Structures are given as structure tokens and as C-alpha cells.
Amino acid sequence: MPLLKLENVTKRFGGLTAVNHVSLEIDHGEFIGIVGPNGSGKTTLFNVISGVYFPEEGSVIFDDLDITLLPPYKRAPLGIGRTFQIPRPFGSASVRENIAVGAMFGTLSGKVSVDESLQIADQTIERVRLQEHRDKPAGTLTPVEKKLMEIARALAMKPKLLLMDEAMAGMHPNDIDQMVAFIKQIAVEEKIAIVSMVEHIMRAVVGMAEKVIVLHQGSKIVDAPTKEALEDPKVVEVYLGHPPEE
Amino acid sequence: MKKEITKYYPLIPVFAAYLLLFLIGRNISGMWQLVAMLLFYCALGQAFNIFLGMTGYVDFGYVAFMGIGTYGMALAITKLAHIEGLGIGIIIIGFILALLMSTLLSVAVGAVALRLRGAYFAIATIGVNEGFRFLIEGARIWNGSEGLIFTAQLNEILGREAASSLMTYWADIMVLIIAALAAFVTLYYMRSKIGYALTALREDEDAAKVMGINVTKYKIIAFITSACFAGLVGATSWALKTPYVFPPEVFEIHYTIEAIIIVLLGGAGTLLGPVAGGLIYGISKYYLAIFMPGFQLLIFAPIIIIIIVLFPEGVVGMLKYRLKDSALARFII
């Protein structure tokens, strides 16, 4: 049984079809890259999965539960965490408090107390190595630190599925390699399925994803193991423009 | 257990300020009037801060909750005055009615207006306040625009002397208690899940939703709490202190603006902010009117602008930042 299953999902904005009859399956602990140029419907697809938008057609099944029309705040506790393309910290709150919010509201029991949440936050902060920034307002972090904080915030929710929107965008190549290694490590340790959305940093996709789904103008055009997918002539044509280098 | 107590340290400066006000009013002759006004502004700020400060939503119709609270107390006194032997109990009934009515109004307004955000929410709430006032006047509810006057009933129930000391002294003490209570609830919220949820939704509502926060629920909690305190302030400051109520006076948007200024001057979302804001606002307003009658607003406006420009986070927001590594930090939030 797959962890997440999208069946024929379509999302339109007026006359624009942002996601067009997309079906896909993601298994427990799987690492998937969603690739596609700007405007291909990646973020909309994420928003449909996390509940920001409801699709016009099709259904979203998570953990055997139909969540197509479930409001976002009820999805998070089921185990869907996400990070944003442009980090969205709760700026005035400290890093610790930001992460505690994840533990407090994002877990299924809903019974994690404030003190327990702060403890979980402290443990999670160590994992992403943000100890020295613990009590700083999250708004004052650097972009890379904000991304780490968002990952920590999502991890504190104990997700089964983590949606990462352009986690590597704007990063130095060295940072990307570190980040990739880190994400891979937590995915294995915590058995989290990770869906990472990438526009153009192939280095990150090749480095971590087992499978790649390529979107083009809202439709899924390729769904295959990474290497195969990136060498697919359709992908090369609509997206890369030239064959990827080995 | 000790940890539980240290959590409430930030109440110390708040309560110290109220105690100081009380002592000044009691011991320096001629000061009680100023102290009463300051207590009113602090209570107003403290009550409004629970919504405005903690959620970041600007409610321009806030005074409506004070107005409805005033009516709650006025109705209890006018309608129940004929019952023998109620005595002081009638005031308790008045408070309960004020709470009930402000809760009902806030649920009704919140259920509709809290679906809107930003400027749209603000505009909708202005409409609520004005609409409610015209409804009372136009439909002649609760005596319409003639209002309710209940000095006679108060005198009758409590006796002339007790009624007069209620109006000139005990009503102000009740405002002080309400302000202190509002401060306590504010801190309690800050330290609980409610506070974390409110901070999250104030900073980024969409991100808060996907983090599992039922933002509507928490907004409504803050809205109702804040409205209840407004109702209590109205019931004391307006109904018990001056035993009459006229719609244009208790639905005057001017008070909402004052409340917004107080919260922003002091520091929105901080515990001590409304006290600092209330004191700065009240003292400047009072003395400017004495020393520069006629020009007070001309001077007052630039003072407010200067403070807001210098300390965009409010006076307490600035203090909190300056003192964050000192021993005082745990007293100021």
C-alpha cells in the first residue's frame, strides 16, 4: 500500500489548468524528486497535497485515508510536513519556539504539552546544528539557516511524508552537498518519505532521489528511476535542452 | 513547582505599576481622577492587546464590545431594580450579563469577520460598530437613542452614599482588577499552546495552517476573550462610573483608535506594553490638556508619531530587545 496516492488530480485556476490529471504513488520511506521548469505545476501539486488548494477532480489518498477535501491543519497531524520555497519562519518567535510549534500542533495525538514540545525542539535543533541560534528570532537567520530551521520544524512534527519545496535553491554547491547528505540521513533514520521539488538544481536530484517525476505544463510526462528519467528524450526536450552530463 | 512560579515573573512589573498607581491616587490629593483615567486606558489596552497584539488583526469595531458591556450592566440595573433585596448582587448580575452579551456579539461578529484578513477585516469591523449603533437607535432597542439612565435606581438599591462611593472610587478599583485579570490571562495564553498558535498565525497564517494549527479556532478564542474584557471595562468604566448610556457615546470609534494607539505605543503582543502605552498616552493627554489647552492634539500627534518611528515595536518591544541578555529579561515580555 503506497503512503500517498494521487488519482487523476486536476487543479484549475479559472481557465488555467495548473495540474492536469496527475496520478502518482509514493511509498513509505521513498525519496522522490519532482522536477519541472517554472510554471510546470510543481508548487500547485504540493499545495494540493498539503491542503492549501482542493483539486477540482481526482482524489488524494494518504495512508489509506481519503484526504482530498481535508483542511490543511488536519493533514499535518496525519504526518504531512512541508517546507517552503521561500522560507516562512514565524519571524518574531525564536528558533526554538518555531520548532516547538511543529511538535505542539503537528503530531497526531495533539497532546504534546508546551514543555514537551520545547524539549523536542531542543533535540531537533541539535540535529540540524542550530544550537547557537536557538534563542534568536527566526526572522534574523540567514537564508540557509532558515531552511534548516524549516526542516527542523517539519521534523518535529514526526512526519511520514516531507514535502520540500526547492530546499536547495540559492545555496552554494558545497552547502547543497551537505544538505543532500543531511536530508538523506534523516530520511533513512526516521523512515520519512521525502518529495523534493526542484526546478534546476540537478546536482541535488541526482544526488538523492531514487525516482523522478517530471512535470510539464501541469501534466506528468515521466515517472521513472532517476537516471532513466533524466535521460529520457522527452525530458531533455522540454526541460534540459541538452543531455545531462554524466 | 518553582518553575511554574518563575513563569509568572513578568506579571511583577505589571502589578507593581498598578499598585503604584493605586497608592498615588490614594495618598496624593487630587490625583484620583488622573489615576482613574490611567487605569481605564491600561485596562483598555490590556484587553485589546489580547486580540490586536496577539493575532495582529486590527479590529476597528472594538468599542462595540465595550458598548454592549455597558448595556449589559445598564439593563441589569434598570430591569431588575424593582426586585427587593438584590443589593450589591445586582452588580454581579450586571457583570454576568455584560460578559454574556459581549460573548454573543463577539461570536456573531467573529464568525463572519474573522474569515477576512488584513484591511478587509478592519473595514468589516468598522461596519459592525456603526451598524450596531444605528440598529439600537433606529429599531429603538433598549430605549433607542434616548438611552438608559439609572442613577436613581443605583441610589435606591445601594443607598445614596454607597452609590456615590461606587461611582467615584469602587468602580475604578474594579477597573484595576479587570486590568490585572486581563494581564494574567494574557500571560497564561502566552505560556500555553494558545499563545504559540497565535504567534504563528500572526507571523504567517498559511504556514501556521500547514503546521497543523486550526487558525480559525485560535483567532476566535482571542477575539472572544478580548471582547469579554472589553465588555467588563464598559460595564465598570462607563456604566458604574457614569450611570447612563447613550448609543453615540458608547459606540464612538474614537475609543477604538485610542486603544489601537495605546497597544502600538506600548508594544503589540507584549505583556507590559499596554501598561506602558496606557500610561504614556493617558499622562500626555491629561497634562497637555492642562498646560496647553486647545493645542494639545497639535503637540500630541507628533509625540505619538515620534515614538512610533523611534520604536516601531513599541516602548516595551524596544526594552525587551535592549534587555534581552540582562537579568531583567525574564520580567519583561
Image (cartoon, rainbow, N blue to C red):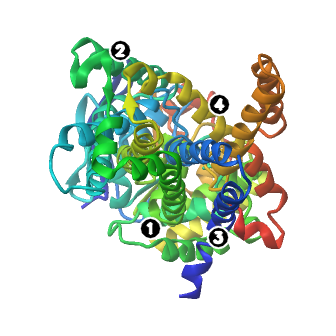
Q: Earlier in the sequence, mark 2 or mark 3?
A: 2
Residue at screen point 75% across, 53% down: A141
Chain containing the residue with disc 3: A
x and y, in percent, of residue B199 in the image: 55, 51
> How many discs mark residues in the rendered view?
4
Residue labelled with disc 4: A242
What kind of residue is marked 4? His
Q: Which of marks 3 and 4 is in front?
A: 3
The quarter of the image holding the C terminus of chain B is bottom right
Q: Which of marks 3 and 1 is nearer the N terminus?
A: 3
Chain containing the residue with disc 4: A
The circle drawn on residue A158 is: 1
Chain containing the residue with disc 1: A
Q: Which of marks 3 and 4 is nearer the N terminus?
A: 3
What kind of residue is marked 2? Gly
Q: Earlier in the sequence, mark 2 or mark 4?
A: 2
Q: Can residue A192 be seen in this view?
A: no
Residue labelled with disc 3: A125
Label 2 in the same subunit as label 3: yes
The circle drawn on residue A14 is: 2
Q: Can residue B185 be seen in this view?
A: yes
